[in-house]
Amino acid sequence: MDTELKNHMLGLQLPTDPRWVDVAQMNIEDILVDHAYCEQKAASSGISLIVQYSEKEHLVDVMTEVVAEEWSHFERVLEHLKKRGFVLGKKRKDEYVVGLQTILRTGGSRESQLVEKLLLNALIEARSCERFKILHEQIQDEELKKFYYELMVSEASHYKNFISLAKEYMPEAYVRDRWKEFLVEEAKILQSLEVRGDRMH
């Protein structure tokens, strides 16, 4: 898995600023709280896809598993918070995801709209995977180091699930080209954001 990620399996155009992990290590409580909400939003997004596209049996099957995993991650992050004497604080505005929403195309067929949603989710999973890899490699807390390795592997799998599903509903060439556009725009968004160690993204 490490080798695959080093070979740019995720396709991300801009690596995370090296300063991020240094600041994050000084804000573990904030990182864990923000991470918990990221997992909650990932589970909610999966449920939304199931509800909106309930007639697509394979999508429902895949997303049901993803939702279960994301909710399990949420529960595990809560455990790490409690173990360290922290509580789940208030939800913060996710400037990264707000920025990503601007990439989405409106209109088009039902399938093209589904693909937009799937690629958005794939992008969030890819960036999360990259961040988890950084935390696994550089964070000092040994327990969290192991935890983030497990999540890195899981998010890489989710990323591939979303990309594969997208290719079921639109031609592969279309998905490939649109994915490249997502990656270019994501890099611009990331570059425009302040480096904050109290956010997972």
Image (spheres, grey):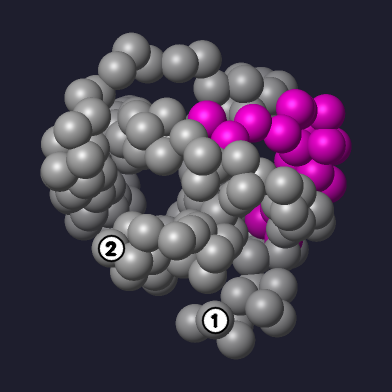
Residue 10 visible somewhere in the drawing: yes
The structure residue drawn at horizontal position 49% and vertical position 82%, both measured from the top left corner, is 1
Quarter of the rendering containing residue 149:
bottom left
Counting other residues with Cα less than 10 Å from the Cα at mark 1, is it few (<14), some (14-19), or many (20 or more)?
A: few
Q: Earlier in the sequence, mark 1 or mark 2?
A: 1
Considering depth in this image, is 75 or 154 the residue closer to the camera? 75
Horizontal arrangement in the rendering, residue 155 relative to residue 134 (left or right): left
Occupied quadrant, residue 62: bottom left
Name the residue beneath numbered marker 2. Answer: 143
Seen in the picture, residue 71 relative to 137 is either above or below; the reply is above
| Residue under label 1 | 2
Q: CA distance from mark 1 to mark 2?
A: 19 Å
Q: Depth check: give the residue in front, 8 or 55.
A: 8
Main structural element of the magenta stretch: helix, strand or loop? Answer: helix
Residue depicted at 60% across the width and 86% down the height: 3
Image quarter in which the C terminus is found: top right
Between disc 1 and disc 2, the foreground one is 2
What are the residue bounds of the magenta stretch?
175-201
> Considering only vertical position in the picture, is 125 above or below 86?
below
> Helix, strand, or loop for circle 2?
helix
Is 196 contained in the magenta span?
yes
Judged from the image, the secondary structure of the residue bearing numbered disc 1 is helix
In this view, the residue in front, 113 or 30, is 30
Where is residue 22? Give x, y as percent: 62, 48
In the image shown, does 94 or 138 lie closer to the viewer?
138
Please give the label number shown on residue 175. Answer: none
